[in-house]
Image (tube, helix red, strand yellow):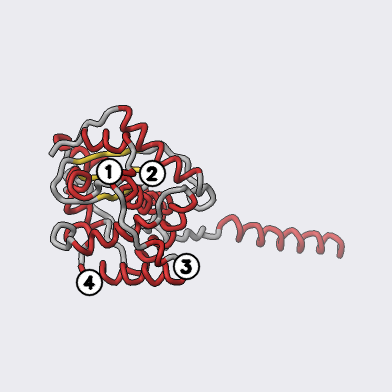
Amino acid sequence: MKKMNKIVTFTITFLLMTGCSQWQKPYYDYSDVGKMTNQDYVDHLASLGESYLSFNKDRQEKISSQSKDYLNEIYHRIIQNNEIFLPKRETVFFNVIQHTTPFIFSLPRSQFFISSGLLKKFLKNEQLFVAALSREIIRSQRNLYERNVVLATGNMTTEQMLQLMKLDLATKEKINEWSYVVLRRSGFDSSALLAWIQLQNKNPLDFALYSGDRSQVSREEFAFKNFLVKEKKINSELITLDEKNSSKSFYKLLSEIRE
């Protein structure tokens, strides 16, 4: 009888325990619902490239397959010589937009946008062009963009895109330092990077939409010169770029761009 009582007691206890686990109201944590992750921001920003091109479909420059190969070659040369820092292997997209405003910007997934005004008026030297492009390759590969969410209306103007590309001074300084190393490792002229920053500083009205506050560009140049001093490269970096050193492929690209 005592043994039976023990069995009954155990059975009741077990049923109470299992009953609680079966009938207890489940708890769901909804605190993260609606929050965007870093990848969400990256995907959203990357998707804006299609809207921008759609809005500027009549302004897209048609470049030859040879020029596309030339641009791809520069891109892959930089990637392959910096594979640890730039690890992504993506299909690259180069888009030249007919626009008088000088600009070059990137979006995630190796999307690059360059204005005809920048190429025809300012980037007449190949090394200068590569220096400007190197910074955008780094931004696209490392997803260096501010967190922004834009309503996708299909009407992304150049002004809106350039506003989204703004960065704080500290981030710009770091990108310049990385670019300097990337260019050197790729066998390009790293002195062109300083020339690219100085070009923006010397033409504030032309680059107002692209560079933003002139005082920030001046501080950017000052910071980069300090970096060169620390690298003991300041004397060798302050040279005049020779346009004659540009390749035939670069001049062919320029010749295909409309005024």
Regarding mark 2 in the picture, which secondary structure is present there? loop
Which one is nearer the viewer's eye here, 156 or 4?
156
Q: Position of residue 197 (x, y in %)?
A: 29, 61
Q: CA distance from mark 2 to mark 3?
A: 32 Å
Q: Which residue carries the number 1 mark?
A: 49
| Residue on which disc 3 sits | 231
Relative vertical location of residue 64 with respect to residue 101 in this rendering, above or below? above
Q: Earlier in the sequence, mark 4 or mark 1?
A: 1
**Mark 3, mark 4: which one is toward the viewer?**
3
Query: Mark 3 and mark 4: span between their CA atoms?
Result: 24 Å
Left or right: residue 156 versus residue 239 is: left
C-alpha separation, residue under disc 4 versus residue under disc 1: 29 Å
The answer to which of marks 2 and 3 sits earlier in the sequence is 2
Residue at 39% across / 72% down in the picture? 226
Q: In this picture, is 76 found above or below 134?
A: above
First in residue order: circle 1 vs circle 3: 1
Depth order, front residue of 156/246? 246
**Disc 4: which residue:** 215
Q: Which is more N-terminal, label 4 or label 2?
A: 2
Q: CA distance from mark 1 to mark 3?
A: 37 Å
Residue 101 appears anywhere in the view: yes
Query: In the rendered picture of this protein, how many numbered marks are placed on residues?
Result: 4
> Where residue 109 is drawn, which disc sits there?
2
Disc with the residue nearer the chain's start (2 vs 1): 1
Coordinates of residue 124 in the picture (x, y in percent): 24, 46
- The residue positioned 47% from the left and 58% from the top of the image is 28
In contact (CB < 8 Å): disc 2 and disc 1: yes
Quarter of the view holding residue 19: bottom right
